[in-house]
Image: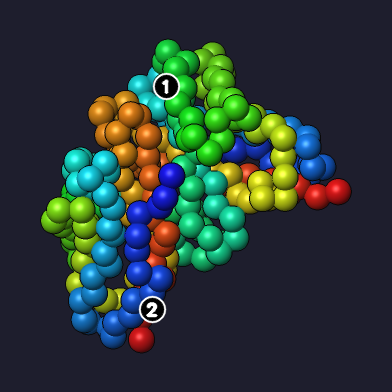
Amino acid sequence: QSALSQPASVSGSPGQSTTISCTGTSTDIGSYNFVSWYQQHPGAVPKLVLYDVGYRPSGVSGRFSGSKSGYTASLIISGLQAEDEAHYYCSSYRGDRTWVFGGGTKLTVL
Amino acid sequence: QVQLVQSGPELKEPGASVKISCKASGYTFISYSIHWVRQAPGQRLEWMGWINTGTGETKYSQKFQGRITFTRDTHANIVYMELTGLTSEDTTLYHCARVTLNFGGYFDYWGQGTLVTVSS
């Protein structure tokens, strides 16, 4: 079962916006709006930052937003801050009661 | 507050089995499923499967089918994951994570992780 496809790395300067893409197939992202995103700092546990494509859990900054088009979901982080530097993983429901994660993207804040 | 607390690190020989626990607290245990996700150092998250804590129904990733078993103790609010036939490729960090029982679902709380090392 192949992972969702994410760019290995992205970068941006403080205050700028950046977008991380997550590409799947017709059996996961293309069929369901059950895409979630996780932020992981080194040595820490993954933290949910978006669910169901674009919904933010309580406590997550409004600078995080999401969208989906076709087989690709996107995480948009606006007003980049140093604390946003981390790995980001997407996940999607894949049908038949299974889930899949993306390969992860390292965000560097320049 | 919601907590998922996992058992400690394990050192196993190739071919052995390992059983890891995940104790839930701070919410109604049977209202959420528990999934298992593993992550090798510096590598991506890998979904392994899940257990419906109310019914005991399980679903495993095809990759682990045949050598993975999830069980639960609804009195102690604990979920167990047993992985057999260990190889060096199983040396990694294993997380449990809570997911709503609604269709779809997302991983909103995670255990701290249990490091399993497979070495002779």
Q: Is residue B37 above or below residue B65?
A: below
Residue A80 seen in the current view: yes
Q: Is residue B84 above or below residue B57?
A: below
Q: Is residue A5 above or below residue B31?
A: below
Can you give x and y, in whole percent of width and height, for residue B57 in the image? 44, 17
Snapshot quadrant of residue A77: bottom left
The residue that mark 2 highlights is A108
Q: In this rendered view, identify the residue nearer to me: B62 or B41.
A: B62
Q: Residues within 10 Å of mark 1 (few under 14, many from 20)?
A: many
Can you give x and y, in whole percent of width and height, for residue B105 in the image? 29, 36
Q: What amino acid is at disc 2?
A: Thr
Q: In this rendered view, identify the residue nearer to me: B54 or A97.
A: A97
Question: How many marks are shown on the rendered structure?
Answer: 2
Snapshot quadrant of residue A104: bottom left
| Callout 2 secondary element | strand
Dot label at residue A54: none
Q: What amino acid is at disc 1?
A: Asn
The residue that mark 1 highlights is B52
What distance separates the C-alpha of mark 2 from that of mark 1? 38 Å
Chain holding disc 1: B
- Left or right: residue B102 versus residue B39 is left
> Which residue is drawn at the image coordinates 26% and 49% (left, top)?
A25
